[in-house]
């Protein structure tokens, strides 16, 4: 198939102006599709561009009224959603997409205010045709249009019934992006385990103060990634180097457990111990079902044993690239 992969955020559109690169599902999806033999263009589009030459158009989506969408990409994507509706395959790389339908309903309800805001973000205001398409796109989602299919990045242990309940597609395909990113390759940590510090590392661009207060960790917690909290921001390879020097990695609670995040694999590869929310622990079970107090009072030898068991479990539960590619192709042939 000839496939266009695009969307409403800069990452969806393969922008070269991103300030921070990190492992994320969009680029993994491009790689997976290409390994499946498809010709993939990963880019933004121009308004009213002729896209008739594509067999499928993968269009990334999230809440239109959140901070993430690039307004110009959002305007251009409205052309895709309203002109090529039957060719669209939805894909997601941010859990905020769970609230996309609600965001579209809000957009329709507060259209005048939302349009004025978007006009202010653009160098020139939307044309009448663009504004019409934007409103039609919001209604398409807000009024319950069901697309043929959607790709949702998820771990193998995710609860499919719960995870798929908020996505507007006739069929949802849960897939693990891990084998298509560098996090799947086991490496030998450069820092000896004997030099690891008893600290928890939380690297996230989102705020998680409430979760941290609720958990009441005994070890010191080092946080990175939230600019508004004056936290340091490092490229992903530097964050992974920080993991290697410490024993603990934190994975805060997500609205729906099982959504794919690279830190789970980064932690395993760095021989760290990952502590996640209770609900996710129960889904994963095994060596991830741990009490933080038990971890924090363990000896170095015991910590090394915990880390080894988690690493073995995590790497053993990655779905291989060939299996995933075959499943993707089967799914595309059915929708």
Image (cartoon, rainbow, N blue to C red):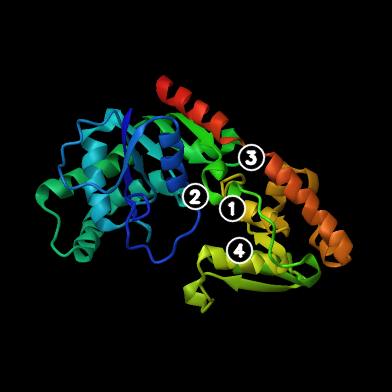
Measured Cα–Cα span from mark 3 to mark 1: 20 Å
Residue 270 placed where, x, y %? 68, 59
Q: Which residue is mark 2?
A: 95
Q: Position of residue 159 (x, y in %)?
A: 62, 37
Of label 1 and label 2, which has the lower sequence position?
2
Q: Above or below — where is 25 with respect to 190? A: above
- Spatial separation of the CA atoms under disc 4 and disc 2: 22 Å
Residue lying farthest to the top in this orientation: 334
- Report whether 286 appears left or right of 319: right
Secondary structure, mark 4, is helix
Of badges 3 and 1, nearer the viewer stands 3
Residue at left offset 88%, top offset 60%: 302
Q: Which residue is mark 1?
A: 254
**Residue at 55% across, 35% down:** 321
Q: Which residue is mark 4?
A: 240
Observer-nearest of 155 and 211? 155
Q: Position of residue 152 (x, y in %)?
A: 49, 39
- Sooner in the amino-acid sequence: mark 3 or mark 2: 2
Q: Quadrant of the C terminus?
A: top left
Mark 4 and mark 1 lie on one chain; the one further toward the N terminus is 4
Q: Which sits in the foreground, 132 or 269? A: 269
Mark 2 element type: helix
SS assignment at label 1: loop
Chain-order first, disc 4 or disc 2? 2
**Residue neighbourhood size for the residue with mark 1, other residues' Cα within 10 Å, grouped as few (<14), some (14–19), many (≥20):** few
Earlier along the polypeptide chain: callout 4 or callout 3?
4
Q: Residue at x 79, y 52 (%)?
A: 308
Q: In the rendered view, does 13 fall on the left or right side of 121? A: right
Label 1–label 2 contact, CB within 8 A: yes
What element does badge 3 sit on? loop
Report which residue position mark 3 lands on.
Answer: 318
């Amino acid at each position: 198939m000839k496939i266009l992969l695009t969307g409403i955020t800069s990452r969806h559109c393969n922008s070269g102006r991103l300030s921070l690169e990190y492992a994320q599902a969009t680029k993994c999806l491009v790689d997976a599709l290409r390994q499946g033999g498809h010709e993939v263009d990963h880019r933004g589009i121009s308004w009213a561009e002729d896209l008739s030459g594509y067999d499928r158009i993968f269009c990334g989506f999230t809440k239109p009224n959140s901070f993430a969408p690039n307004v110009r990409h959002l305007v251009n994507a409205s052309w895709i959603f309203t002109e090529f509706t039957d060719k669209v395959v939805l894909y997601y790389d941010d859990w905020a997409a769970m609230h996309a339908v609600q965001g579209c309903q809000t957009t329709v309800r507060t259209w005048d205010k939302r349009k004025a805001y978007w006009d202010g973000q653009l160098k020139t205001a939307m044309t009448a045709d663009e504004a019409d398409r934007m409103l039609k796109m919001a209604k398409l989602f807000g009024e319950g249009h069901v697309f043929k299919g959607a790709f949702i990045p998820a771990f193998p242990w995710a609860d499919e019934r719960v995870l798929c309940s908020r996505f507007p597609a006739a069929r949802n395909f849960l897939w693990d992006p891990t084998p298509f990113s560098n996090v799947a390759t086991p490496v030998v940590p450069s820092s000896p385990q004997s030099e690891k510090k008893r600290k928890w590392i939380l690297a996230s661009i989102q705020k998680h103060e409430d979760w941290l207060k609720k958990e009441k960790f005994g070890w010191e917690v080092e946080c990175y990634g939230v600019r508004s909290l004056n936290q340091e921001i490092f490229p992903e390879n530097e964050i992974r180097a920080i993991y290697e020097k410490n024993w603990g990695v934190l994975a805060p609670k997500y609205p729906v457990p099982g959504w794919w995040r690279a830190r789970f694999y980064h932690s395993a590869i760095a021989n760290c111990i990952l502590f996640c929310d209770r609900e996710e622990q129960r889904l994963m079970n095994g060596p991830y079902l741990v009490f933080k107090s038990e971890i924090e009072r363990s000896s170095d030898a015991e910590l090394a044993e915990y880390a080894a068991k988690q690493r073995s479990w995590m790497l053993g539960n990655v779905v291989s690239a060939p299996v995933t590619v075959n499943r993707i192709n089967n799914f595309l042939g059915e929708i």
